[in-house]
Image (cartoon, rainbow, N blue to C red):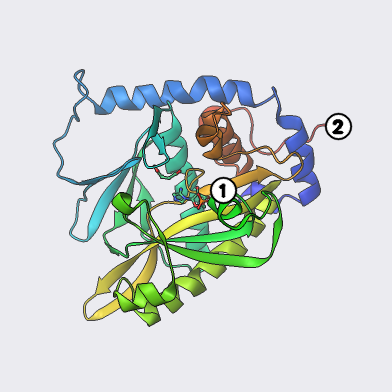
Amino acid sequence: MDPALAMSPRDALVLCGARKGMVQRPLRERLPFQARIFDALNNKPDGTKMKSRKLVYEGKAKILYEGPEPGTLIQYFKDDTTAFDAKKKAVLEGKGVLNNRICEYLMTQLTGIGVPNHFMRRLNMREQLIREVEIIPLEVVVRNVSAGSFATRLGVEEGTTLPRSIIEFFLKDDKLHDPMVSEEHITAFGWATPQELDDMTALAIRINDFLSGLFLGVGIRLVDFKIEFGRLWEGEMMRVILADEISPDSMRLWDLRTNEKLDKDRFRRDLGGVTEAYSEVARRLGILTEVHNPERKGPVLVK
Ligand code: AIR
Ligand code: ASP
C-alpha cells in the first residue's frame, strides 16, 4: 500500500506543517530539469517530434496520438496552460510531467476500487497509454464546497461547504463557452441517453467519495472537480468509462489547514507558484519521492 494512504490525518497535518522550504525547494529545482531531459530525448532541435506518429487530436493541454494497437491512444501532457476560454495562456515548465504522474496515480487508485477508466499504463514522463473511447460531449462537475463559477452564478460565498455534493453538467463546446445544461437538454438532444446519465452520475458520486477520502488523508480538501466520460465498445456491448484526465488542472484542491490553493486557480488568479503547488500535491500523494528525492522514502514526521 502506498505510504501516503496509510497515513493518519494527524500525520498528514504534521506533514503539511513541515512542507514549507523543506521539501519544496529541491522539487522545484529538479522537476523542470527532468522535463527538459525528456523533451531533449523526444524532440528534434527544431521542436518537432522524433518519431512521426499520427496525431489524432490536439487540445489545449493534451495531445492524443495513435496508439501501438487498435483501440489504444497515447495521451501526451503538455506544459501549456489555459484559462477563460484560452484567453489566458502560459507554458509552465514541468506541469505536463506532474499531471501525467498525478493522473496515472489517481486513475490507478480508481481502477483499484472498480471504477472503469481509460488508463492502461504510463509510457514515460509525459505520456500514457489509454483506451480509445468515444467521448461523451459533457463535462461532469462534482462540487463539495462553493467555488469558481458556482460561487459567482449562485452567490454562495466561496468556501461554503455545500449541504450535499452537487453534480452539474456542462456541454463541451468552446464556441458556446461550455454552457451549463440540464438532464432534459442532454437527453432531448441525445448528447447522452438516460441510462448513460445514470451511469455517469453513479460513477461521479463514487469517484467523489473515494477521492475526497484519499485527499483528506494527505491534508487536502477536494473542493470540486471536472471529469469526462467515454463510450467503450466491446463487440456489441458498450460501457461508459471514465476518460480524459484527473489532475490539478481539473480539480480544486485546498490545503486542509491553511486553505492554500494547490490547483489551477493559482494560474487563473495569478497567485504564482503553480507547478510548485502541483509538486506539493504529487509529493503528498507519495508519487514523487523516488523520482525527485532518492534519499526520502516516505513521509517524514517533524516535531
Ligand atoms: N473545470 C471545468 N472546466 C475545466 C475544468 N478544468 C474544473 C475546474 C474546477 C471545476 O471544474 O478546474 O475544478 C469547476 O469549475 P468552475 O469554473 O465551473 O467552478
Ligand atoms: N480549461 C478551460 C479553458 O481553457 C477553462 C478553465 O480551466 O478555466 O478555458
In the rendering, which numbered label is found on residue 148?
A: 1
Q: Residue at x 53, y 19 (%)?
A: 29
Labels 2, 1: front one: 1
N-term mark: 2 or 1: 1
- Asked whether 111 or 222 is in front, the reply is 222
User: Does residue 14 sit above or below 168 in this rendering?
Assistant: above
In the rendering, which numbered label is found on residue 303?
A: 2
Say whether residue 5 is visible.
no
Q: Residue at x 29, y 75 (%)?
A: 190
Q: Secondary structure at mark 2?
A: loop
Label 1 CB-ligand 1 distance < 8 A? yes
Amino acid type for the residue under numbered disc 1: Gly
Q: Residues within 10 Å of mark 1 (few under 14, many from 20)?
A: some
How far across and down, in percent of the image, does residue 280 sit? 60, 35
User: Does residue 91 sit above or below 112 in this rendering?
Assistant: above
Toward which corner of the image does residue 52 lie, by quadrant? top left
In the rendering, which numbered label is found on residue 253?
A: none
- Asked whether 73 or 165 is in front, the reply is 165
Say whether residue 60 is visible.
yes
How far across and down, in percent of the image, does residue 27 sit? 56, 25
How far across and down, in percent of the image, does residue 33 sit? 44, 20
- Asked whether 273 or 168 is in front, the reply is 168
- Asked whether 208 or 193 is in front, the reply is 193
Quarter of the image where the N terminus is located = bottom right
Q: Residue at x 53, y 51 (%)?
A: 149
Q: Residue furthest right?
A: 303
Residue 120 shown left or right of residue 271 in the figure:
left
Residue 200 shown left or right of residue 176 in the figure:
right
Alpha carbon distance from label 2 to label 1 = 36 Å
